[in-house]
Amino acid sequence: MKQEVSIVDVAREAGVSIATVSNVVNGKGRVSTKTIQKVRKVIDELGYTPNLPARNLKTKRTDLIGVVVPTMKPGRLQDNPFYWDLLAGVEEGARDRSFHIILTGIDEATETFSFVKERRLDGLIVVGTNEGSQAVQRVTGLGVPAVFIDSYLKDSGLYQVNLDDRQGSYRATSYLIEQGHRRIALLIGDIPMERIAYYGVLHERWLGYRDALEEAGIPYDPRLMIKLPTSLAGGYKAADQLVELPDVTAIFSFSDVSAMGVLKGLKEKNKSVPGEYSVIGFDNLFMSEYTSPSLTTVSQNIIEKGHAAVRMLLNQIDGVPLSERRIVLPAGLVVRETTGPGPHQSSE
Amino acid sequence: MKQEVSIVDVAREAGVSIATVSNVVNGKGRVSTKTIQKVRKVIDELGYTPNLPARNLKTKRTDLIGVVVPTMKPGRLQDNPFYWDLLAGVEEGARDRSFHIILTGIDEATETFSFVKERRLDGLIVVGTNEGSQAVQRVTGLGVPAVFIDSYLKDSGLYQVNLDDRQGSYRATSYLIEQGHRRIALLIGDIPMERIAYYGVLHERWLGYRDALEEAGIPYDPRLMIKLPTSLAGGYKAADQLVELPDVTAIFSFSDVSAMGVLKGLKEKNKSVPGEYSVIGFDNLFMSEYTSPSLTTVSQNIIEKGHAAVRMLLNQIDGVPLSERRIVLPAGLVVRETTGPGPHQSSE
DNA sequence: TTGAAAGCGATACCAT
DNA sequence: ATGGTATCGCTTTCAA
């Protein structure tokens, strides 16, 4: 450590009061040009840097926002690059406004979010929680501006950023149907189907799948639901179950990483893609274009999701009235090489 | 906002002094069991949360560390999941010690690191800078505990965590040679070769490549250096150059993502892997096992890298004497499917 | 065992 | 245009 120069040192050295120094630092109040220059000079000479935590004591603002993402089993951040892209969006948006972000992995079941109050964070961005989760009430109980991403919370008073998951899922499924597939498996996540309504994102995507089925007059078959995690490893294992399902010619996997796992698993079983199975993912990660065969997937602008969330949060912090508390980003469909014609070609 | 309960409120309500409250909160000093219970009770009732920034004013500690990673062109975080894995390691290590991390993307050329002093961060982890970079002097000039990851800085006084890049690169190259490859291209990064010594990580890996060549008596051919970014897109473009290189049968790409790009590019050119070209990457990202064909690569424990860095930093902050200021993690070689026999099978 | 009081570094109101 | 000073919430001697 070297220096401990405070506003007092600057004031003394410049021969003015600390109030004046404070004014020139913040560009507030009326200070003569002459004094400003003098103070500036001293600040440079002394290498003075304002102490933000001290300032916070008076201003009640930390210019700090928290970003919480769910952790994997052992309390480690998820192994899905999706979060990195999202973080890139949030970080960029925050930096533009000279906010900084504190990143934490949390265990939804035990996290109390006390750090938000202890550190007096100005706001919080929560990723991927669900209706009924402890986390939601705890966060709202904080009384701190917050934005939930990918959480589908009923409470219309909450600020949320989502993707149009249902529509995206509908489009993906419809596309498969158009291609002539009838029995389409779903890698839906490691959840009990009877509680699916509690898993917002998964539920919406599941509904989109059913929408498409219904529209095409194809009966929904619950046996086609593969209940494994939407992770790389989950996808890999899903391939085992997939090949046991009779007459299934396609699988829709609820994340790109899990679709990659499926691809790998099928390859090891010498099943061709898209020959024997069509595979479709979700997210359109930047690397999904580079898998082989390249992945057909539901696309979303993850960076923009981060931007939207941080923009919404900062407006909230600034007290800017928001017309809409819920932002829904559009989902697209990117057709690449993992999908092909199925057995029921519609030539009509 | 709802509450503004401070230590004063607790003291008043509990009928004790703020000093006593402070003591029970911090478990310091001598306080009777009875008083402790009383104060605890009031704290619960009032929902009191200590104000860390205020505490910092006295203690000079923020329990906050900064993690800075380089940004891509437009000031956005890099599109390489490597950073996410690294961050996962750092975050986990920090959380275990109830430190929080502030993540920032920086532009090495312009960043002044003033936020480190303004926010009174306890320490800093810098990823991927280089000897001679402005960033290094600026960081050391801060007088704040710091750890550099993947930076290969000469100054032995600096705390650093690196991989044994040279050894890893040597092993990869040797393996290709053993397999019968003689002309091996290198996707080395978007840098001028005459300045390679300034790019620590790339330089070390380049040296490892040369070590292996020399050992095998194969002359070094500078025309085999492909100077494109070690990104997905860079790898993709590298394939164009690769196929123009006469007699080349293998490429060693200095990152897994770029190797994935190469794979994609070769596939589009109908070049088989590992038939016509063997491809080897670097990093062993969790997804590299799932590409198709799965990627042979130099492996490193990225999570452990993050752990090591944060451990080193926290010890430094705590004033624990470190025997060694430079940690070098071992590199391995994971042989998977993108490498195969070359034209010069050594049957001896 | 407990409390009074002096800071820590900055802001902001109120005088001058 | 400046400066004096109370204040923010907490830690830490030093007394009692």
Image: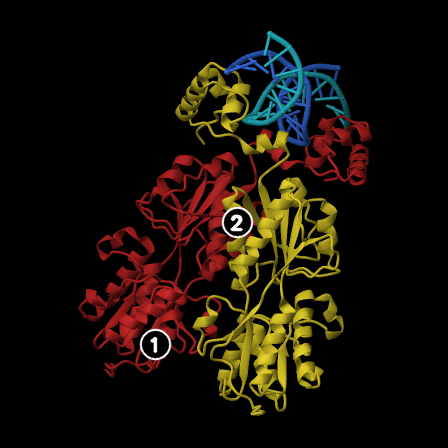
Chain colours: A yellow, B red, C cyan, D blue
Q: Mark 2 lies on which chain?
A: A
Amino acid found under the numbered disc labelled 2: Gly
The label on residue A93 is 2
Q: Work out which quarter of the rendered image holds the N terminus of chain A and state it.
A: top left
Residue B198 in view in this figure: yes
**Residue at coordinates 62% horizontally, 41% vertically from top-left?**
A318
Which quadrant holds residue B113? top left
Give the x, y percent position of residue B154: 31, 46
Q: Name the chain letter of the residue that bears numbered label 1.
A: B
A336 in relation to B252, above or below: below
* Residue at mark 1 to residue at mark 2: CA–CA distance: 37 Å
Q: As displayed, is residue A104 above or below residue A238?
A: above
Is A151 located above or below residue D12 in the figure? below
Where does label 1 land, which residue?
Answer: B266
Q: In what quadrant of the picture does the C terminus of chain A appear?
A: bottom right
Left of A98 or right of it: where is D6? right
Q: Where is residue A310 in the image (x, y as percent from the top left)?
A: 58, 50
Left or right of A56 in this view: B47: right
In the drawing, does residue B195 fall left or right of residue A237? left
Q: Nearer the viewer, residue B176 or A237?
A: A237
Residue A104 appears in the figure: no
